[in-house]
Image (spheres, helix red, strand yellow):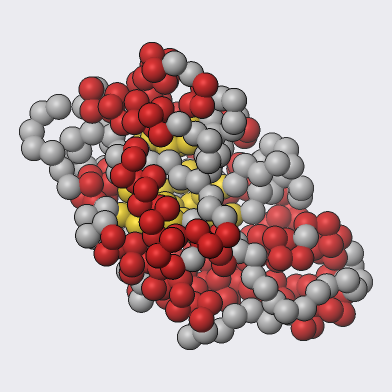
Amino acid sequence: MKGAIMNKKQRVLDCIDGKPIDKVPFSFWRHYFGDDNYGKACIARHKELFDAADLDFIKMNSNGYYPIDFGVSVRVPEDWKYVVPPKSGSAYFQEQIDLIREMREAVRDEACVFYVVYAAYSFLTRSFGKEICDAHLRDEQARPFLLPVLDAMGDFVAELCTALLRDGGATGIFEAYSSNSRFSPQEYRQWIRPQDEKQIHACEGAGNYNIVHLCGGTDGRNDVSVWADYMGSTIHWDQHLDRVSLAEGRDLFPNKRAIMGGFDHREGSALYTGSRDLIQAMTRSYVCAGGRTGFILSADCTLAPEIPYEHLRWVGETLWDIS
């Protein structure tokens, strides 16, 4: 390594902006369960991983607020009339704003905090089930009941992202878009993309360091070209499932300043079971493919709780070695 060690926050921001940095930044994340999704316990669990692996930034999951408890069930198309998104100023908004503020305080505002907000359609499928949402979306008789709710959810997500950035002070929103493998490109663009665009425009209007995450999902390979023109400071996708390499992704997404990705996040992959030598060799190969700036090393998605922290530290140590 040459020169002074950078502040973690500045390292990540400069990396995204394509400026010279002292080393390639990296981060990993996982989901939490039960009470660990709320308040001080949520802050403690995120900081535990951040400290244990000496990560460069925190990607904060919002599992406690996803799915949403709408207080109604949907069985027939007419039931969509009773689905109403949370309002600005509600506890749903304020609790998440407070979480971000407390997370920033916990790291003394010396590291970036990116907060996950899922796409409008993802909120509905997670809250009511993919099967009924997809069925009603494809049914010409049911669709007129669902589309107004989806439109309202798009407005809600846009408002939430704006509040989390402006009032919570999140560095950026980690925008998690629905996997598109269940739909044709035409269907996705017609029904789901309009709400994605609301989220993108809200995030870009309120912040300059948002991360576009293209969910790999479990439904098959995505058509990544459907998202090629999405705008964000950083684009992150599942290169192993969707078979788009880091080098290919750098060319595929023109409306970004940086790319993020690298390791396969699935249990049983090298990050879980590999030797130190293997993980360090893979780290070097990803940096070679991604570049020395404008690239953040991570996994394709969320890691399982069983991941050995030591393996994550091997990644960080290697990044210092090759700086």
Residue drawn at (62%, 42%) of the image: 216
Q: Examine the rendered structure and indicate whether residue 320 appears above or below residue 81.
A: above
Q: Examine the rendered structure and indicate whether residue 128 appears above or below residue 233.
A: below
**202 or 286: nearer the viewer:** 286
Residue drawn at (28%, 27%) of the image: 317
The extreme top residue here reads 277
Q: Is residue 251 left or right of residue 216?
A: left
Q: Position of residue 262 (x, y in %)?
A: 46, 31
Q: Examine the rendered structure and indicate whether residue 295 appears above or below residue 133.
A: above
Q: Examine the rendered structure and indicate whether residue 144 appears above or below residue 266.
A: below
Instruction: Please tell me in which quadrant of the rendered image residue 284 appears.
Output: top left
Question: Is residue 138 among the parts visible in the rendering?
Answer: no
**309 or 175: nearer the viewer:** 309
Q: Position of residue 221 (x, y in %)?
A: 69, 37
Residue drawn at (59%, 80%) of the image: 86
Question: Is residue 274 among the parts visible in the rendering?
Answer: yes
**5 or 206: nearer the viewer:** 5
Residue drawn at (78%, 57%) of the image: 130
Q: Position of residue 146 (x, y in %)?
A: 78, 73
Q: Position of residue 129 (x, y in %)?
A: 78, 60
